[in-house]
Amino acid sequence: MAGKKLRGIYAMLVTPFNSNEDIDYDALRAEVDWCAEVGVDGIVATPSIGEFACLTNEERWKSWEVAGEQADKHGLTKLCTVAAPYTREVLEHCKVAKELKFDGAQLIPPYYWIPDETEVYRHYQEACATGLPIVIYHNPKLSKFFMSREFVGKLTKIDGVIGMKEVMTDRHIHLESLFKEIDGRAPVFTTFRAFTTGMLLGSGGGFINAFAVPACVKMWQLWNNGGDRDRIEAIQCMVNEAFPRGGEDNQRHIGTTKMVTSTVSGINMGSPRAPYMLPEAHVEAELKKALPKLNELLQD
């Protein structure tokens, strides 16, 4: 199965909400426009930070439609997240994504109950059989399923797998052996925390939280144009310093993500859906102190 070759920076979109916790589709369109202006190669609609787990299927599909239509205006690659706790629902999402002419989708292993490798392999195999190209999404903190490098190597041999998004960041313990095992069969995309590490190992780019897109686009451009490696590393260090740490281990993670994206993009993403909340005020204050240093590094 031939899918679109993925390479570059793909923005993980936040799903904006208004004060009634309804999706703000105008803000979603503005977010896609902003990502395009910054220089992304594609978008990922309703990822984990897009709160897919807090959306109805109808809201999720409408978000794909709106984000996809806006992405088409800019010629961006369109991906979405088809994750669900069981395969039958994933297949339904794949069907809708194909109807909306998405280029592919990212898929995390089934979550809540802990599956074994046979179950996860079947999950991916059936998703790929729909004809929708699939990006493996490895996030063991959320899925509760750790993919060994050997198992990932097996998954990348499934017809229809076109890439992997890896959230783990340790080079020596995990990333080096992972890249070696995959051996170029599918591009690996890292997160913003380990972006330069990924490039050194031969990544296909990054699946990047929307707020870190400007920095990662700049690093990617510098890297591919033979730019100053010291500057690239300085940007990476400042990204890790400026943006709140913790990720999936952090309480108020989704609220923090929405606040940071609002601050960086200038688009109001609203609060997450209850019971989740925005972070305490000091988190935003600390971010605003750090951002000027990062922005200075991004200036040509």
Image (cartoon, helix red, strand yellow):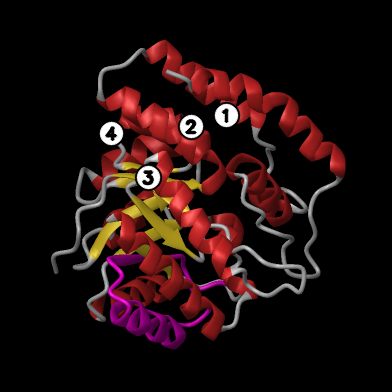
Magenta span has 96? yes
Determine whether, in the image, residue 178 is placed left or right of residue 53: left
Contact, CB < 8 Å: mark 2 with mark 1? Answer: yes
Under circle 1, the secondary element is: helix
Contact, CB < 8 Å: mark 4 with mark 1? Answer: no
Question: To which residue does mark 4 refer?
Answer: 202
What is the magenta range?
83-111
In the rendering, which numbered label is found on residue 40? 3
Q: How crowded is mark 3: few (under 14 residues within 10 Å), some or many (20 or more)?
A: many
**Mark sitting earlier along the chain (3/2):** 3
Q: How far apart are marks 4 and 1 (CA)?
A: 20 Å
Q: How crowded is mark 4: few (under 14 residues within 10 Å), some or many (20 or more)?
A: some
Question: To which residue does mark 2 refer?
Answer: 215
Q: How far apart are marks 3 and 4 (CA)?
A: 19 Å
Does 289 sit above or below residue 94? Answer: above
Observer able to see residue 299 = yes
Name the image quarter holding residue 175: top left
Which of the two marks, 2 or 4, is nearer to us in this view? 2
**Mark sitting earlier along the chain (4/1):** 4
Q: Position of residue 105 (x, y in %)?
A: 36, 66
Does 219 sit above or below residue 57? Answer: above
Under circle 2, the secondary element is: helix
Under circle 4, the secondary element is: loop
**Mark sitting earlier along the chain (2/1):** 2
